[in-house]
Image (tube, rainbow, N blue to C red):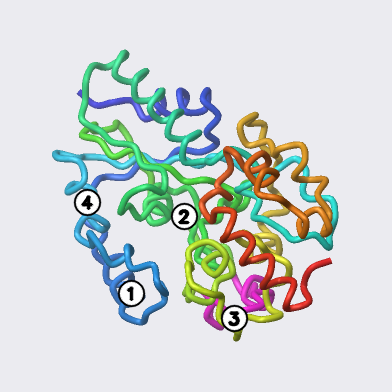
Amino acid sequence: MKASAQRLREAAYRLGFDHVGFSRAEELTEEGRRLEAWLNQGHHGKMAWMENHFDLRIDPRKLVEGARSVATFLFNYAPPETQRDPDAPKIAKYAYGEDYHHVIRHKLRELMDGLRGEIGDFQGRCFVDSAPVMEREWAKRGGLGWLGKNTLLINRQRGSYYFLAVLISDLDFDRYDGPVKDHCGRCTRCIDACPTDAIHPDGYLLDASKCISYLTIELRDAIPEEFRGKMEGWAFGCDICQDVCPWNRFALPHSEPAFMPHPELLEMDGRAWREMTEDVFQRVFRKSAVKRTKWEGLQRNLRFLGEGGEEG
């Protein structure tokens, strides 16, 4: 019996997801070659974990036995409001509210439970940026957007401020989607705006070791001196290549309560950031993804900004 893609899509919409795409579970052969070349060039920096489980990363059937399909979900996180002081250290919009890993994983499990109640048991696993899964490639295959010159998934209707999640299962759906056209055209705004030159001049290739998000979150060592004065005030993550993307003029604010920022966050000015105590950090970012960098990591980033004359 085939499962209804439309029924699953409607159930996902009720849980707050914005878009759902369906692909057949098969090896990502060409995508795997590009990933291997990217790793060989060292563009992953010190994220050594990206070299692990390569075979699982390119073939979902090795993650879920008997897998027949990959359903990909987009969840909007474009905030209704942003930080009010333009001179204060900035954090990426995705980290304003609660950690998306927990919020979206809970929603996907609820979705799977509902599906099992309707059609019976099936084998499946949900992933939210938590396993060797190439989410953007599956979103592309599922027709949810194209991979832009900044390498992020861009949806033609609402831009790129989306969390991605994946359900790999042995369900066979009654319809599957296909990729959509690339609509970046001749635009180079993301390339031109990147202060660390992390995006290749021709686009579609990111040197993550130069990306501000990598430098402020993934890198555990001291931030290299070559980036002094180039961080443009970002203390955790970076939204520059998304903020300048013309397709994000179509972004609409989300309505998910869990992703609303802590009341203090948007009001914090430069002085409040500089004088932030560990107690304030724990209170403001108690459920946020910012906790990934820990108090000490955020302090490292803030010191680097201050020493570079980038703080207000």
Residue position marked by numbered label 1 in the rendering:
39
Labels 4 and 3: the sequence-earlier one: 4
Residue position marked by numbered label 2 in the rendering:
180
Neighbourhood count class around disc 3 (C-alpha, 10 Å): few under 14, some 14–19, many 20 upward: some
**Residues under labels 3 and 1: Cα distance?**
18 Å
Q: Nearer the viewer, residue 20 or 179?
A: 20
- Dot 1 lies on which element? helix
Neighbourhood count class around disc 1 (C-alpha, 10 Å): few under 14, some 14–19, many 20 upward: some
**Residues under labels 2 and 3: Cα distance?**
28 Å
Neighbourhood count class around disc 2 (C-alpha, 10 Å): few under 14, some 14–19, many 20 upward: some
**Residues under labels 1 and 2: Cα distance?**
27 Å
Labels 1 and 4: the sequence-earlier one: 4
Query: Of tags 1 and 4, which is closer to the observer?
Result: 1
- Dot 2 lies on which element? loop
Which three-letter amino acid code belongs to the residue tagged 3?
A: Asp
Residue 194's place in the image compared with 92, above or below, is below
Query: Mark 2 touching mark 4, by CB under 8 A?
Result: no
Q: Quadrant of the N terminus?
A: top left
